[in-house]
Structure formats: C-alpha cells, structure tokens
Image: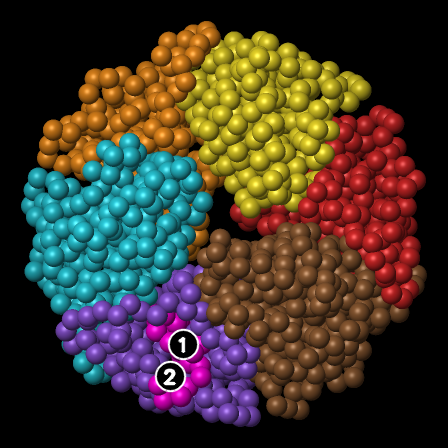
Chain colours: A yellow, B red, C orange, D brown, E cyan, F purple
C-alpha cells in the first residue's frame, strides 16, 4: 500500500473534493490518496501574493502527512507553490502539479499550450515553464476566469476555458493542452474527447509521479540544495515551524 | 492489466534479461512487462553509427508490440534511439529511458550527473540533456567502459563506474546520479545505498512513466509533429516498413 | 526627502544594525533610511525552508512601511525572498539586494563571482542569476559559513570568506566579487581595497536602485503580473493579510 | 580535382536529377559532383518515421562513395538525416543541407525564415535550427505541400510555396528565405529575383561547404564524439553494415 | 558634488539639449550634469554604420571628461554605442542608456516593450536585450520614424510613437514601455500618465546608475576584459588616440 | 574570376603578408585575393578599445574594394571587428574570420576550443561564440601572448600557443582547435599534423565562405537590419564617410 498525500493549498474544501476525485481516478490499485485542505491562507491562489500566504499552511500539512505515514506528497496548485521549501523539509518525494503536467505533456507532444485562469498567473507559469526546461515547447494562455468560478456551472468559466483551448489549437498549433489550475482537474478526459488531442490534468499526472518515485525507492536528495533545514529559532507566531 | 513492451534495441539477449528484471522490479501490480530483444542491428549501441542501424529492428518490435496489445512501450537504450520515429509510428505512448531518468532526477535533486559508458556517448547525452531542458542541471561523465563489459563481473567495469560516481559527487557536487546505460539497470539500489544519494536507473523510471500515461488515458498526440506517417512506397529490403 | 524602508527578513536585530549602516553609507543626502527587523520568522535565512517562513513577517513590514510613507523598499536578504509577492502587494518600488548587486556588477565587469554563506544557498542564487539574465556571466561559490557567524569576529567566518574570494579570482578569473549575504554588508569597501577589484554589497546597491526609481517617478507596474491582489478571504491565523 | 558525393536519401531518381543540377550549378571548376540516389528506403522523407528508414541506404552510399574516392559528401535532405552517424562512419567531411543553408543565411541576414513542405517537418527543422545556434534568428513555416508534388508543375505546390514566402516577408520581417526541402533546389535564383531578397538553397550551399573543407585540408575529427565505430557484430539483414 | 558627463554621440546640439534636460531632471541634488555633444561623426545614429563612425568622437569626449574631473559617464544613444571600448579606456564607470533603461524596467515589470525609431535599429536592440539577459522579457518595436524627426513637432513622429506604444500594450501585453531613443528623453513622464503604465527613459535611468556607482565607490574593473588598453602605435589621422 | 578583398584592420603590413599567404593557400583556382592593410588605426587589435579605432580604416578599405570590383570581402581580425557596419555599407558579402572558423569547426567536430592571444580578448570571443550559436560547443582560452609577438620566432609565442592547445585537448576534451588570431594563419596545417586533430585558421575559412556566397549568387540582404545607411551629414574629420 502506497500512501500519497495530496495537499490543496487553496483553503477551499469543495475544490479539494474535485482534486481528490481526480487523484483517485489516476491512482493505482494499492495507492491510498489522502486529500487535505490547508487550514491557513487564501481560499484561492491567484498570483504571487496569495502564494506567499499559502506557504505556512501548506508546509504544515506536508509535515503532518509525512509524520502520519505518507510516502509522497502532491502540491495541488498549478504555481507549484512552496515546492522547493517542501522538498528541503521532507524526506519523502514532493511533486508539483505544474511540473508533473508539463513533463507528461512532453512525452506525448512536441509543442503544447497551458491554459490557466487569470492573466496574472500567466507570467508565473511561463517562468515555471522556463525553469522546467520547456522554453520553446510550451505556451501559456489565460482564460480570464477566477479559480473559484470553475466550481460554479453558471459562471461561464468553462465556456471561456473551451474558447481559449480552441484558440490555442488554431493559433499556437498546440499538439496537446495542459490545464493550468487544480480546479480544472475533472475536465481533462471530457475536453480531450471534445478537442481530439491530449488534454492533461496536473493532479492526476502528479499522483503518478509520486507513485513512481515510491515504487522506485527514491526520495528527495538530502545532499546539497535540499539538505534538511538548519536547527534554529523562529520568532513570533510561526515559531512552531522552527526546525528542530 | 496494463501491458508495457520494453524493447532492447541492443541485440543481446542477456542484456535484455537484466533490463527485464529492472522493469519488473519497478512495475506495479497489474502491469505485465513484455521484454523484447531486437533481432536486427548491433549487439550494443555505442555512438551515433550503431544507433542508426538499431532503428529498423527497434521500430519493427514496437510496431509488433502495439499490434499484439501493448499499451505503451519503453525504448531501453540511454540514447533514446528512435524515440521520435517511434512516436510518429505508434498510437500508444513511447518512453525513452534517458528522458524518464532525467525527469525523475529533476523531481528529487536540483543538480545531478549522468555516468555513461564510453566517451563517444558523452556528447550525445549532453545533447539529449539540452533537449530535455536540463542544461545547467545535468552533467555527463563517461566511465570509459564498453556496454557489454558491464555483464562481465571480471571486467573491472563496475569498479570504474563506482570511481566515476565518486568523482561526480566530489567534483560536480552531484545531488543524485543517473545511470547512463540500460546495462546498468540492476545497480541503482545497490549504488544508492553505497553512496548515500539517489541513484536512478532509466529502465525502471521509464516503466513508471509508461504506466502513468496508460493510467491517465493519454497517448501520443497525432496532431502536428507526430501525425501518422504518410502512406508511400519504400524501396528495397526495408519495403515492408512502408506506411500503409 | 526620500524615505526608503530597508526590511531585514532575518529576525535578528544586530544583523539589521549592520544592514542599516551599509544602507545609510550608500544613501544620498536627502534619503531617510528606515531599517526594520521582521518580527516573525527565522533568525537567519539559510535555504528554501527558512525563506518560506520569512514571508509573512517580511510582507507585513513592507505593507506597514508603505502605509507609513515609505516611497520604496529594499528586501535585505540575498535570496530576494518574497520579491514578487511584495511587488504585487505594494505600489512603491521594491528592490532585492541580489538583483541590485548583480546589475551593479554587470555595469563594471563582464564576469563576476558571488560568494555566499552556505552550500545550500548556492543553487538558489544560481537560479536567481539565471532569472536576472546573468547566466554565463556570474558564478556562485559558498564559503561554508553560517549567516550569523559573520557577526562573531572569533568565528573564523571572515577568513573563510577571504579564502573563497581568493579562489574566485584565481580559478574563475573573476573581474569583480559580489557579497552573497546581507550580513556581509559592512565588508565591501575593505575587501575591495584588499583584493584590488570591485567588491559589491547588495544592500548599498539596492538603496541606490530604490532612490533611482523614486527620483524617476517610477513605481511597480500594476498592469499584468503585479496587478493588486484580488480581494478575498484568508483563513486562519494569517487572515489579517487578506487583500481588501 | 575535388570529388563531392551528393547523396539523395529520398529514393526518387527524378528528385536526384534536380539536386544534381543545383549541385553542379554551384560547384567550382575542378569539382566533380557524383549524385547518387539511395536504393533503400522511402521515396520521399516526410517526418521522423521516414527518416529512420532512410538511414541504412544513405549510409551505404556514403560509405561506398568514400571508398570510391569521394573527398566529401553532402546529404541532400533538409532534415539533415543521419548526419551524425555519417560523420562517425566517414573520414571525409559530411555536410547537411539544412546546416549549410542556415549558416549561409546567417552571413547575409540577421533574421530569416525557412519555408518547408509539410507541417510535420516544421518542428524537426525548428529543432535543427536550435541545434545549429539559430534560435531567435530563424523561423520555420510549412507550405503544406508534399515533397514529390514539387516535381509536378500542375500540383499547385510552387504557388503555395510562393504564398508562404510572401507571408514570411510580411509577417516575420524575414530578411532572407531558406528553402526547406532538397526538392526546391532549382528555385532559389528565380525566387530571389522575384522577391528581391536572398533565397537560399541548401544543396548548393552544402556543395560549397564541402569544397571549402576539402580545400582547407580538413576532415571530420576522429577524437571524441565522431571516433570510428567500435568493431562489433550486427545481427540480421543489416549485418553487412557492422564496423570492421 | 558628483560630476556626471553625459555624452551625446549624435553630433546634433539641439538633441543634446533635450538629453541634458532629462539628465538634470533625474539628477540628485549635488550632481552636476555636464552634457557634451560629440564633434565627430553622424548627426544621428541610425543603424550599425552610423554607429561605427560615432565611436572616435564619443571616446574623445569620454576621455576628455574623465581628465577634466567627471566621476562617471553616460553614453546617450540607445544602441549603447562604444560601451565596451569606453569601459576599457576609462577608470570611472560608464553607463549606456539602453542597459540602464532595461534594468530599470526589470525592477518594476515582468514584461516590457522597447519602442525605437527605425526598423533597422530593431534587431540591434534585440541583440542588446539578449546580451543584457532580457530575452523573453523584452520585445522591441520600431515606430518607423527618423531620430531627428522627433525634434520637429510637425513631423507626426510623436503620434507614430504613441500608436506603437498602444500596439505594444494591446498586442504584447506590455507591463511597461521603454523609450528606445535618446531623442525621446523628454516624453517619459507625459506618456506614462497618458498610458497608465510606467514609461522609462534611458537618459534619466543612466544618470541614476552613474550616481549609484559613484556613491558606492565603485569603478570599472581593470582586471580582465576591461584592462587598460595596451600601449602601442596608432597609424594615420587617429594616431592621437593611441594608448600611452 | 572571383575577386575577394581580404582587409587586415591591424595596420601592420608584415601581418597582412602572413594573412595573404593563408588566403591564397585556401583560394580556389579562379579566385584573386586582394590583400589590403588598413592605413588608419592600431598596429594590432587587442581588446575593445583598439577595435573602435580600427573601424574607420577598415570600412574605408572595404568601401574602396567594392568600388574597385571586389565581389566579397573578408575582415581579417578574429574579433570580427566592424562586421555589422560593413554589411550595412556593402552590397557584396562580408565575412568575419571568427564566424567562418567557428562554422567550419562545427561541421567536423561537436566540441572545440578557440585559442586566442591575450586574456582581454577571451570574453569578447566568448560573446561572439554565443552570438554565433556556439554556446556549449566552443570554449575559449588565451595563450597570454601579444598579437605581434607571433611574428617574432624568438618571442616564445608559438611555444605558449602549443602549450595552450595541449591543455585544451587534455582539459576541455577538444575535438578540434580554432586559432583565435589572424596572425596565426600560417600555423593551422602544421599544428593539425602535430596534434592529430583538426586545427582551423579563420582566414582560409573565411575566403572559402566568401567564394561560396559569390558562387551562389548571394549578397547581403538589404531588407531590414542591413538596409543601406541613411543619407546624412557627418561632422568633422570623418565627414568623408557620410552616406550619400
């Protein structure tokens, strides 16, 4: 039995339910998905500022999950919020849904387009794309919808998403589409059928990477950049996070 | 049940046995590994020339595997020989062991070193590293051993490999090691314990990527670069490969 | 009168005193330096994990400084901790000491080396260097000293720093040196005389960039990536940070 | 007398005739062009799959040409099919028409556009452009015509090619055009006059590079990547290609 | 008192007046701006050819300014004409207006567009952008106006500039605008108000960088690339420039 | 008959004699080499400052050569001094010896090292290497010899050059060597035999590229970046260079 913690750093339980469904849909027989909603921070992460305040709650849950027996963790926000900090903290592998989705796309298409929610998230994802070595392969587009509007069937959000995918295919010559928000996790198979090209959800993709690392007996390297945090004092309300 | 074909384009059955063991060791319950030795081409692939003549035999087996029900294929040579041609031919996903190993390393370490066999394979792997977006993250070293010497316990090959790994840790500040030859597939766990940092074998890594894509319902995009080959005449002894 | 807030996200007041001296030493007549020690988070920032928990305290002080009349802010930690979040939050310009130091070095030298404290900070600074367009121009070395040991004259830290600078000159052909930690801010002029090449401190460099932007009447663009945070609920102990 | 072998890996003799004319039109007095049609493989190379099966026939002819006294070889397919393998095999210099055309363009224009045949060839040529250091200088467009349709004056192929060149000039600000298929070799001078900017054919360009290397007394480095293939057994119908 | 020489390598005194105003508008209390018009070379610099002939006059004035007590120099042409030569010659810091403007933009915006004068200057500025590490962040557009037409209120040049800025905002998603010619130095504040995003003039930006370097006690590194010119004979009319 | 002007921007006639010999040694039957020594500027070009003052004399001779019937020009200085200005001025093709040498090396080796004269020329050549797309393929080393010492058999310069080549082979794994100074043009064949790998001289390489462009009927694109200089007034002693 492999236990994979899927942490939603957006503090919105209904969104976690969507994410958990996608995670379980992708999980292997023998994988237990423990889906957790962070209890500190923004109800949705839209841009760099929200991201900063999602970190303590996210890291709290990743630490707790590891202590309670998780063998790997997934960060279910497309900004890959806190990924490096989590890797420095944990011994188990930690996977971001953006990196997992892009890597997955790179195995089945030469060129792909990420369709995300808000314009302010476009450049952060372009920067991730560059960091993950996808410069020249990935384009990023924003459908100009808010994260939580994806949950409301009457918001028109999903129609805007569809229109942006259609533009990506026509204008970018996209060979595959990556859904650029954890809140779109339930749409991959439907949209894939609809548009006739692979549509990739990062939550499912990340669960598979987490399973892979566990199966291969691999965990985060503790030599160099991800060495365990140095024991020291933390001041103020965050003092409980101080490394022992 | 997921069926993953693992094709060894090196036409040496004993090497395939090592590869098959590594593949099965990584496979999930419910995954059937079909390990196949190519029947046309060099007994070992060492450099660009050998690679060229490994292609027909490799593609023959990938095509046959797909017709016989494989849902994904792994190309078990660290040059990722014929990867693009295989993706254009097949509908199922096809994974190279170099790309899978590098991606896996990138999830658990910021900087890693690939240790391969012969000096003439160093630059081809550096080029793959660049293509997979690992420039600045991956270094490549050659242990100056032949591929098939890895099978001979008295060849000294494994000692040379160990020495090169030690140099990578000391001189490159490597946080993880990638084994740069399918013939090293049995060594990852032993070397990982020995050196105290993650050591990654591409065969196991690729099997997990193959399973991931099947579980996610994803296959090679047939829009754009990997569109099916155009029906046409092939002349001479290779005419049986002509696309219908 | 220009007011520049210099925020030390390391919650160590003695370190802030060193930083404040360096800031005042660089400031123009007519610039008031308001040096602030963050009151939440690690006493020193050494790696990605510490960085994450420095963010709330840092952003709190930047927000307070802007409300109290600061016209620009400097983040006095060489990881440029929270820089993008601060820019999204503030209207005034916000400058990181790493970016300011690298840019300053680029005006007076073709090739330079950053000497930082701990090995675990080397790769994060390499990533910043890449992000700031200094790939191929900047190298990064760690002197293997802790941040706070720089304050203790008997720790040997400054000797180790000198040795690493000497190696950078000999082995990297460095034309200038960048000091890779806010805690080294008092050493630039001494070391510059000692080694006969420019040695750059990021705190002073950032103060000058802050003054420059104020003098030019420029502030953070609120179009696109740094648009003001969307008004929404933040859950739990960080709820006071929720954007209005 | 310099003898340059021009090998057409497309197994279509009428296409070789066009190529031979272009080669001879560019050759110096004292250069003998030996134009050869490969006798194994696809009648035209359109994408990665065809490329793989063009290799054995291509390498056979290059080997034969060298044994029969050629001093340099040109691979007359714009994918630069088999270029690295040929260089590992041969001692004489081997030139690809894509690399030769791009290098030639770079001497007379800052920005240029390659116009190729089919959409599936666009990304492979973009990858070559990246590999040859032309990222940011070269764009690639497909005219959506098949390779062999270029031979049929009634196919409309040449009109589509003209339209795509016109778009490259208008939309890409192209300063020169590179013809992205060996089958266009006869069109460079006509189109150059027609559009008033340089139009470059790779066949002629490659012949000049071949002559240049011979005149300079330079041949493929046999140190490192292009060291001669290791002597070994090849299995099956390709066994005659085994390195001695 | 800090003395900054601002050299206009365009030999047009009226243009220098505009530049001097912009420089003084940005200068700190205590900075003396010495604005100088070069007396040798083209009346305006439009492309690579003009640039070559602007160099002797430019370097003459920079040398003279340093001998007469300037502590830093600004080269007031957006091609950063002669920047490396000036740095090799001078001990004081020398700043180009293109580099200063781009660096300034990078502190307040993730993505920005440079709007320059003539199409022939577009690629040179793209090359500078690449050299200054702004690839992927900066786009360059030409308004198709001559440099000196900016001085004529009836030329329509400023309207064309406005139209191009509007296109940059709409089509490039520009978060800030950089004015790509010294002759636009008076327009930054007006256009900034007009378009509601930061508009950056390089002359003011460079003056601030010059002041910064002086205040920090930094001058051009004389180790390595910018070592003083080797003493030698210069032949012909330029012999007075021979390094002593 | 093809006439190629080879301009030595170093104003030293004895150096031109060496260059002319190398050019004639590489030229085809039917090519006339017109070797010219510039009459204005430094006796040798060592660094950015010398380069600036070599430009007027160089461009004067290129202009004169074109008017007197040259069909192509070679700039015989490894900094590719004034290359872009010359291309904007001339209609005939103009080739730099650095670009020609690197391109030539790229056809016969995957990795090569440039060995130049003085340390101050190392970074400028690294920048050219980057501009010509050779990043990751080319390394640059300085033998710490002056340009003109190459002419003096008793200076020890050639021994230092040999030592540096030996280091490049041992430490860089160089597969070929590029001679990084026009004054080394006579050494390529001797050193090639001596070291057993290709050694490339840029003068000969550039002559072949010049011949190639003439044979192909190609000249510098006059659309875009290299459009003819705009007619305008030049002030002072350089007024004779003003474009008509």
Q: Nearer the viewer, residue F67 or E1?
A: F67
Q: Which mark is residue B104?
A: none
Q: Quadrant of the C terminus of chain F?
A: bottom left
Query: Left of D230 or right of it: where is E222?
Result: left
Residue F66 bears which disc, if any? 2
SS assignment at label 1: loop
Residue at horizontal 49 percent and vertical 25 percent from the top = A144
Left or right: where does residue E240 sit relative to residue D230? left
Q: Is residue F76 magenta?
A: yes
Q: Nearer the N terminus, badge 1 or badge 2?
A: 2
Q: Nearer the viewer, residue A85 or A197?
A: A197
At x 41%, y 69%, the residue is: F222
Q: Observer-nearest residue: E227 or A173?
A: A173
Does the CB distance between marks 1 and 2 fall below 8 Å? yes
As helix, strand or loop, the secondary structure at mark 2 comes to helix
Q: Magenta segment, which residues?
A: F65-93
Crowding around mark 2 (Cα neighbors within 10 Å: few <14, some 14 to 19, many 20+) is some
| E148 in magenta | no
Task: Tell me what residue is drawn at x 87 percent, y 37 percent.
Answer: B70
Is F105 placed above or below C51 here?
below
Give the residue number, with chain letter if any, for mark 1.
F91
Q: Residue F39: horizontal and vertical position, in percent?
A: 27, 85
Above or below for B227 versus C98: below
Q: Splitting the image into 4 quarters, where does residue A4 fall? A: top right
Cα separation, mark 1 vs mark 2, equals 8 Å
């Amino acid at each position: 039995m492999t236990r994979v913690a899927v942490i939603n750093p957006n503090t919105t339980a209904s969104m976690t339910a969507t994410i958990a469904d996608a995670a379980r849909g992708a999980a292997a027989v023998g994988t237990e998905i423990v889906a957790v909603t962070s209890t500190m921070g923004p109800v949705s992460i839209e841009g760099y500022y929200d991201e900063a305040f999602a970190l303590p709650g996210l890291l709290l849950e990743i630490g707790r999950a590891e202590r309670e027996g998780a063998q790997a963790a997934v960060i279910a926000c497309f900004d890959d919020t806190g990924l490096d900090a989590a890797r420095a903290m944990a011994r188990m592998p930690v996977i971001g849904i953006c990196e997992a989705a892009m890597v997955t796309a790179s195995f089945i298409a030469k060129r792909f387009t990420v369709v995300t929610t808000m314009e302010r998230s476009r450049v952060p994802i372009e920067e991730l794309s560059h960091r993950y070595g996808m410069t020249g392969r990935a384009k990023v587009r924003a459908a100009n919808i808010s994260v939580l509007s994806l949950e409301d069937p009457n918001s028109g959000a999903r129609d805007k998403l569809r229109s942006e995918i259609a533009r990506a295919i026509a204008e970018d010559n996209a060979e595959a589409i990556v859904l650029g928000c954890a809140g779109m996790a339930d749409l991959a198979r439907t949209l894939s059928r609809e548009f006739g090209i692979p549509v990739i959800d990062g939550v499912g993709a990340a669960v598979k990477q987490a399973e892979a690392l566990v199966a291969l007996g691999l965990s985060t390297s503790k030599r160099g950049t991800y060495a365990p945090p140095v024991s020291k004092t933390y001041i103020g309300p965050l003092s409980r996070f101080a490394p022992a």
